[in-house]
Structure formats: C-alpha cells, structure tokens
Image: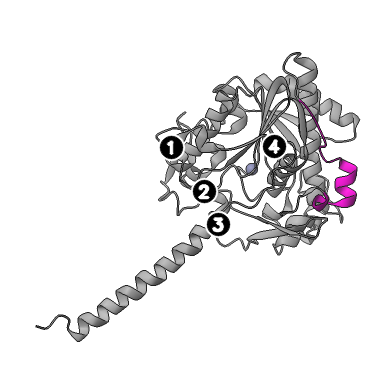
Amino acid sequence: MKVLSKKNLTGVIIIVLCVGIAGFGSIEFTSQWEEDAVYAGPGVTEIKNLSDYFADLKGTAGDTKVYVLEGEEPGGTVFVLGGAHPNEPAGMLATVLLIENIQVSKGKVIVIPFGNASAYTHTEPQEAYSREFAIETIEGEERTFRFGSRYTNPIHQWPDPDIFVHSSGQTLSGVETRNLNRAFPGNPDGYLTKKIAYGIMELIRKEEADVSIDIHEASPEYHIVNAMVAHQDATSLAAETSMELQMENIRISVESSPERLRGLSHREWGDFSDTKAILFETANPSQGLFRGRGGSDLVLSGKDDFYLRAAEMDLLYVPYDEEGKPIEWRVNRHLRSLEMVVEVFSRNNPGREIQFKNIPSGERLVNEGIGAFLLSGE
Ligand SMILES: [Zn+2]
C-alpha cells in the first residue's frame, strides 16, 4: 500500500519545518514576556500581581508585579504607577528607585513599575527605537531596562478598529484602543488594555489609595510637559505641591484635568474612586518627533542636536540647551514631586499620613547617577 506520494512527502516535510520555525519563534516571544528585573529593597513588605486585584488578568500579557511597602505605623496610602507608556523611561525608573530604596515608617506605598506589561514586549514600528538601555550599578552589574511602546503589543490585542470609542462615547483613532492611558476606567469584559485599566482601578479602590500618581514623560514639543495634571479633587494638593517645589527651585506647573478628555488616569481614577489623582510629565527627547538618531544614548543623555535647533527656533515648551535632558534630571523631578505630594498630603490629612525615608536625593542622583541607587542581584 502506498502511504505517501513523493509530492505529499515534500508537503509533510514543509509543514514540519514551518511548525518548527513557528515553535522556535514563539519561544523567542515567550522569553520577551519576562519583566525586567526589579530587586525588592529593604522596604518591600509584599510582592503581589495585578491579577490579585482582578483575577482575569492571570496568565495574560497584561499581568504585572505590584510592590507593597508598608510601614509599621498605620496611615494613608499612596499608589504610584510607572510604565503606563513604556517609551517614557523616567517614570518606570523613578518607580524602580522607590522599590529598591525607600523605607516606609507610616502608611503604605504601592508601586507598579511596568504599568502596561504587554507594551514592554515591543517597540513602535519604523521609529528605530533602541530595544533596551543599560545602567551600571556601583557593584558593576549592568542592569538593562526595556524601552517599549506607547501601545499594547498587537500580538496580544488585535485587530484595531478604525475608530476607538471610549465608554463615554468619545472617539479617537483606532490605535488608541491599545493605549492604556485612554482605557480607564477599564472594563472587566473588555479587551486586554481595558482589562489592565480595570485591574489598576480595582487596586486603587480595594487599597483605598488616598493619593494616586501616574508618572509619564512627553516630547519637549508637546504643550503639557514639566507639569502635573490634576483631577479637580486633587487641584489644591497639586497647587500646594507646585508652590513648595518652586521654593526649592523646581518649576512644575499645574494643569487641571479637562472634564471632557476621557480615558486618562487623572480623569477616570478621580471620577471612579475616592483617590486624589495626579499625573506627572517630564520632557523626554527620545520619544519626540524632532529627534535625530535614536538609541540608548539618547534615552539616557537626552542630548540631541535637532532639539537644540528646535529650541533656538522657539518651538519647545521647555528650556533646552547643550546639557540636554539627562535621565537623572528627569527622574529627580519625578521623585521630588512625589516626595512633596506625599508631604503636603500628610500635613493636611492627620491620621492618613504617609512617611518614608531613603528616597534618593537630587544632589546624589545628579552627581552619582541612577546606578548609585540600583541594587545588584545575588
Ligand atoms: Zn505618557
């Protein structure tokens, strides 16, 4: 009996080869789902997952680690989100420095460094972004961090509709369906990005976070940069914080969250929970449209000749000179803002104070670099 003709045999061989190649490729993709290493510092009391707050995220590319730093004395709770947009590295790095350094004595600090874990698994097509950048610790370990995309990976959520319709009825271009900071307050039955947003909303509600901070960066040519965007319930907190920072020579303006711009953290976190929601922005040339050659150098130094020319032509919303916008400078602004928000909130809310120590100082960050505050593995 003839089992296989020569032609069929060739077909079978081709199929086996294709399955092999696809299998090999999927191993590579699976390895990309591992989050970058973050080492629990002395203040970390518990490591959870976002799926502990919304079980549907378990086993998906949207699940991510949640670090809890709780003091011995009871007090208030602050939630800090980094990495909602993985092409804005200063936010993620600021949260990593909190996890690896601070020690909480009163209240609770809850931190997510990689807000949109799926968006860390790819970079934006045709932008020639570097896939990662490295920072050396004082012990000489090279810590690498991914530079990801603004959007959820289409491998995890596809296809995009032509038009993205938010639950409020607001319409945006289809790609925004994969933008975590347009997906709030999320939807437990929605697609992945909506589920991540819902998980974060659930965390804020279940932990009864008094204050919630979403850390971003923006292109230097974008009009809201070097700013805090505050929900109306957090306006006075942000304004007082900005005044105090100004006395320390850190200028950060306060913008109020527009009521009709929907899906953003500073709008929906405040509308759908009791938290005081504020978003931080710094200027990041590596995500900007004017930049020249990208790469990890630009991510870290923020120095770019085209931005220098744009500044000379008065096209930017931030001062920009030969010094660029180094990552230490950007992370420092986020840490100083966070420190001050917590201080002002604690001062005005007796019984809900949050106190911690060992947050990296601006002077040491600028003089010694981020690596001085990153832990090394075993
Ligand atoms: Zn952003």
Q: Which residue is mark 1?
A: 56
Q: Which residues are magenta?
A: 355-372
Q: Is residue 328 above or below residue 124?
A: above
Q: Which residue is mark 2?
A: 152
Q: CA distance from mark 1 to mark 3?
A: 23 Å
Q: Is residue 83 above or below residue 142?
A: above
Q: Pointers 4 and 2 in contact (CB under 8 A)?
A: no
Q: Is residue 14 left or right of residue 44?
A: left
Q: Nearer the viewer, residue 227 or 214?
A: 214
Quadrant where the C terminus lies?
A: bottom right
Mark 4 residue type? Val
Q: Residue furthest top?
A: 350
Reading the chain from its start, which is encountered first: label 3 or label 2?
Answer: 3
Label number found at residue 44: 4
Mark 1 residue type? Asp
- Nearer mark to the viewer, of 3 and 4: 4
Q: CA distance from mark 4 to mark 2?
A: 28 Å
Q: Nearer the viewer, residue 23 or 166?
A: 23
| Residue depicted at x 45% and y 42% | 192
Q: Which residue is mark 3?
A: 122
> Quadrant of residue 129 in the image?
bottom right
Question: How packed is label 2: few (under 14 Cα within 10 Å), some, or many (20 or more)?
Answer: many
The image position of residue 185, as x and y in percent, is 51, 30
Q: CA distance from mark 2 to mark 1?
A: 17 Å
Question: How packed is label 4: few (under 14 Cα within 10 Å), some, or many (20 or more)?
Answer: many
Q: Element type at marker 4?
A: loop
Reading the chain from its start, which is encountered first: label 4 or label 2?
Answer: 4
- Nearer mark to the viewer, of 4 and 2: 4
